[in-house]
Amino acid sequence: MGGHRAACASYGTLMLHETSTDFSLGVRDRDFLRALVHREYKMHIDTVCAGQIKFLASSPESSVLLTFFDCGTPPLKIEVHPAHQSSLQRELVKLSGDEYLDLLARAQTSKGSMHLHVLRIIQGAKFGI
């Protein structure tokens, strides 16, 4: 249809990092993080949807939302942000440049069928699953 599989395969998982150390993940690590985001999304779907509805009610002009899962320090924090014009967007652009902007453009043209989710973890963090 819209080339979703090809585009996603070319990105894998957008890996942003805040340190100057070499931080790279293999396919299995990225698959684990994808599964972790999906698990958290399903476990907290009520919180995510309530945050999205609240945000859209207050900012109906926002066409693309970004759901931010902060696993940096327990407990998990879930926030909904506009994908545009937020401090989080500036940070993501600073860390990834054109890659985030390309994902954002694809989400805009998807007319709601593509959503942006960001998972923040700390290198070396332990997950109790």
Image (cartoon, grey):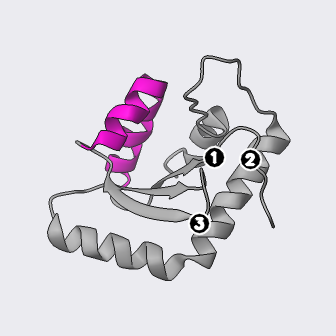
Please report the residue visible at 22 percent of the width from the left and 42 percent of the height from the top.
Answer: 85
* Residue range (magenta): 86-110
Q: Position of residue 111 (x, y in %)?
A: 33, 58
Please report the residue visible at 41 percent of the width from the left and 62 percent of the height from the top.
Answer: 79
Q: How busy is the neighbourhood of tag 1: few (under 14 within 10 Å), some, or many (20 plus)? A: some
Where disc 1 sits, the SS reads loop
Q: Earlier in the sequence, mark 3 or mark 1?
A: 3
Q: Is residue 103 left or right of residue 35?
A: left
Q: Amino acid at mark 2?
A: Ala
Q: Is residue 39 above or below residue 23?
A: below
Where disc 3 sits, the SS reads loop
- Please identify the quarter of the rendering in which residue 101 is found: top left
**Is residue 101 among the parts visible in the rendering?**
no
Q: Position of residue 32 (x, y in %)?
A: 78, 52
Q: Amino acid at mark 3?
A: Pro
Q: Is residue 126 above or below residue 49?
A: above
> Which circle marks residue 94 in the picture?
none
Which residue is labeled 1 in the image?
121
12 or 44, nearer to the observer: 44
Q: Quadrant of the C terminus?
A: bottom right
Q: Is residue 32 left or right of residue 12?
A: right
Q: Position of residue 112 (x, y in %)?
A: 36, 61
**Membership of 97 in magenta stretch:** yes
Q: Are marks 2 and 1 in contact (CB under 8 Å)?
A: yes
Which residue is labeled 3 in the image?
75
Please report the residue visible at 49 percent of the width from the left and 48 percent of the height from the top.
Answer: 2
Which residue is labeled 2 in the image?
125
Q: What separation in Å lies between label 3 and label 1 (alpha carbons)?
A: 12 Å
